[in-house]
Amino acid sequence: MPTYRDEVVILRTHKLGEADRILTLLSRRNGKIRAVAKGVRRTSSKFGARLEPFMVADVQLYRGRTLDVVQQAESLGSYGADIVVEYERYTSANAMVETADRLNESEATPQQYLLLVGGLRALAKGDHTPRSVLDSYLLRVMALSGWAPGLGECARCGTAGDHRSFVAQLGGMVCANCAPVGSPKVAPETTSLLRSLMAGEWDAVDGAPQHASAAASGLVAAYAQWHLERGIRSLAHVETGRAEMTR
């Protein structure tokens, strides 16, 4: 059918002409979509505010040759206003939507859509630190894409045990025999925190010491960027914001 409806998260937008906007959307049923919203930059637009980054909407689209066309949009989650009021929330949200955009279209699933919506909702509510929400999202979206990090047995040889080295290139925690020379050691509490972030055990995440959270964030960032095969540019702003707050 040339016309269809879907639930979407707006990942990013670009201006087109004097009044239009090109949207990159992550949808619940149709993967990643590129569409044009005509006239939304005019002050008289009825749904321009519903098609901003971090918003969740129910949209009706018309299938075009190169870009689909947004015909209607109804808001399902207005998270943008609560996210942009705090710099760390904003940078974390940018890193999340950039990661979702980087994933191949064939890897976009309903579970990834729901995970991103849940992450943006958590950022907007402010129940947990923004970086913890981001770290949990990155670990879980990597797992949904087939890149779950090994956090129990050795990711390379399968040896069971409490291993002390995390090597992104090898898939996670590795035993002493598989760890390359000079691999940094990971404290047990950091490994435990990584497991809690993966499982969404928020009592444990919120109660983790700051040094373990910082160490876990570094490992998660390295792991995600290795598997995406290119850097997540927004992560640099997340790190800058954290450094400024700790001064």
Image (cartoon, rainbow, N blue to C red):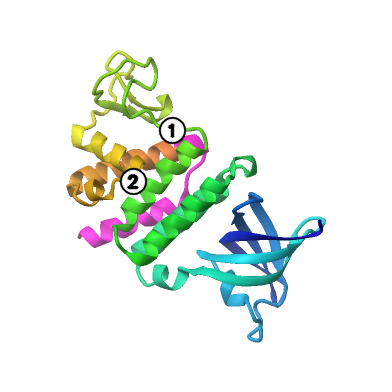
184, 28: nearer the viewer? 28
Amino acid bearing label 1? Ala
Check residue 225 for magenta coloring.
no
174, 108: nearer the viewer? 108
Identify the residue at image location x=49%, y=39%.
Answer: 144
Range of magenta residues: 226-246
Quarter of the rendering occupied by the C terminus: bottom left
User: In the image, is 223 to the left or to the right of 207?
Assistant: right
Q: In this picture, is 55 found above or below 106?
A: below
Residue 165 in picture, x, y percent from top left: 28, 26
Q: Can residue 239 be seen here?
A: no
Residue 83 found in image quarter: bottom left
User: In the image, is 213 to the left or to the right of 11?
Assistant: left
Residue 130 in picture, x, y percent from top left: 33, 57
208, 231: nearer the viewer? 208
Q: What residue is shown with label 2?
A: 200
Judged from the image, the secondary structure of the residue bearing numbered disc 1 is loop
Identify the residue at image location x=25%, y=23%.
Answer: 163
Quarter of the rendering occupied by the N terminus: bottom right
- What secondary structure predominates along the stretch shown in magenta? helix
Using a 10 Å C-alpha cutoff, classify the residue at mark 2 as few (fewer than 14 neighbours), some (14 to 19) or many (20 or more). Answer: some
Residue 197 found in image quarter: top left
Alpha-carbon span between mark 1 and mark 2: 14 Å
Q: What residue is shown with label 1?
A: 148
Residue 106 in picture, x, y percent from top left: 64, 40
Amino acid bearing label 2? Gly
Q: In this picture, is 84 found above or below 128?
A: below
Q: Can residue 9 be seen here?
A: yes
Check residue 241 for magenta coloring.
yes
